[in-house]
Every structure is written in structure tokens, then in C-alpha cells.
Image (cartoon, rainbow, N blue to C red):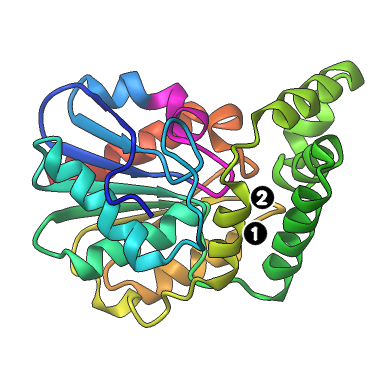
Amino acid sequence: MAEHFAHVVRGSGPGILLAHGAGGSIEGNYGPILDDLARTHTVVGPDYPGSGDTPRSPESLVLDEVADSLVRTAVDAGVDRFTVLGYSLGTAVAVRIAVRHPERVTGLVLTAGFAFPDNRIRLALRVWRDLLAAGDRLLLARFLVLFAAGATRLNELAPADVDAAVAALADFAPAGSPEHVELGASVDVRADLPRIQVPTLVVATAEDGLIPPEHSRRLADAIPGAELVEVPAGHDVTTEARDEWLAAIRSLLARVR
């Protein structure tokens, strides 16, 4: 696995390091809020192997190595200290960064995340992996839209718009998705949570069928002093509750500042 990931750097000011989700990318998971964050901060967004312009890994991903590579990417970009924003699988990456590199981390925002995959998440990841192996991108996209979209948002759409969302997602899946999903099925950061010593905000996506909000509540309960907020969205928080999510992130950044 490459030590340095392809990445974007935007803005100026205090540092933010982004950790994206499985089968995602920096642009795909954070694109709608990147410019807003860059108005006040230097934002470093590395893409995992097989996402964006980072080459796919020929071997399985290891959580510690992914975490260390994100930190090296930020430091090489001139950002020595940073708040880490983790989304979905990226929450486990962010937690591991905070434990392995405490001298560099000023705060955490953990959105739609989990400390370990319970049976429900494990089954979802297995279906995801099997559909990737079968090459059926359209069926995979239907599966992800069904479980990841919030019920309120999904039922507001016209059938043609649902079909369009499915088609767009089918075209998006990065080449490294199988390794991302495999990593998601293996993570377990429960022992790390009590060791976190920086201001932490946990954002639960209240209508999330892929990573249900009780996982965020468990994260907040286990991290000393963590604050929990819930936003009315499914897993695709950038589409369904962009402004609420950004406001929550801003609240943590204000505390860190």
C-alpha cells in the first residue's frame, strides 16, 4: 500500500484532515462542504487506495497503515496538527489516528460511524462485497440506495429520480471498493475510544439504515466528554442534511479554536 495518498489541499488556517467512507472518496463524501470548510481552515483530503487518483492496493488494507498514511499525507502537505473529520468507515480511521498520533490531533468529528461491525453491518458488507464480485453495479446501487437513503428523503423522490440516483451511484463505485469493504468488516476500535483525549463531536444520522444511529450513540458514550448530535438524514448526509451537518462540524471547530 502506498504511504502517500493522492489528495486535495484547500484553504488556509488551522488544519482539517478528512477520512472518507468505504466505496467513497473525498469528493464523493465531502465535496458539498469542502469550499465552506476551506474558507476558515486548511483542508487536506486524501483518497484511500483505489479511490480518486490513489492507485488500488494489490493487498488488503490495514487500519493502522491507512491511518498512518493519512497523517503522513497531511504532514507532507505542511499541516502538522489538525482536527480529523471521519465519515462512515472513516470514523474508525479517525479514532485510530487520534490514538496513534495524539500530538497531532486537536479534535474529532465522527459522522455516521461505528466502532466495530455488528452482525447487521457485517451482513450488509458481505452483500456489498458479493455484489462487487459479481460485477452487478446496478443491483449494488439499488441495495445501497435502499439502505443508505433516509426514508423521508427517499419517499419524497419521484420514481424517475430514484432511478436516476441509482444510476449515478452505479457509475460512481471506485475500483478499490472491495478493499474498503473488507477493511470495514475487520475494524474494531472499541479499545481505543476511552483513550481519546481531544474534544469530540459524534454526528448520528438518524434515518440511516446502513449504519444505524445507535452505533453513533455507542461511540459518544465510550469517548470521554464526547458530544452527540443527531441530524435528520440517512447515510448520505451530504445530500440530505448538508447544512445541519456543516453547522455541527462548525460547532466543534469553534470549540477547538
User: Magenta segment range?
Assistant: 21-33
Q: Amino acid at mark 2?
A: Asp
Q: Which mark is residue 83?
A: none
Q: Is residue 132 left or right of residue 181?
A: right
Residue for badge 2:
208
- Residue 79: percent from left, percent from top: 11, 39
Q: Is residue 27 left or right of residue 215?
A: left
Front-most of 15 and 203? 15
- Mark count: 2
Determine which of the numbered discs, if any, sits on residue 212 in the image: 1
131 is higher (above) or lower (below) than 34: below
The answer to whether residue 132 of the structure is visible from this angle is: yes
On whether residue 57 falls in the magenta region, the answer is no
Residue ranking furthest to the bottom: 191
| Quadrant placement of the N terminus | bottom left
Point 40% across, 65% down: residue? 63
Residue 24, image quadrant: top right
Q: Secondary structure at mark 2?
A: loop
- Residue sitting at 52 percent across and 64 percent down? 114
Q: Main secondary structure of the magenta part?
A: helix
Q: Quadrant of residue 13?
A: top left
Give the x, y percent position of residue 190. Answer: 42, 79
Q: Is the residue under label 1 in contact with that under label 2 (CB below 8 Å)?
A: yes
Residue 60 lies, in percent from the top left, at 51, 63
Q: Amino acid at mark 1?
A: Pro
Q: Quadrant of residue 76?
A: top left
Q: CA distance from mark 2 to mark 1?
A: 5 Å
The answer to whether 113 is drawn above or below residue 120 in the figure is above
Closer to us: 157 or 210: 210
- Percent position (x, y) of residue 11? 19, 21
Q: Circle 1 — which element?
A: loop
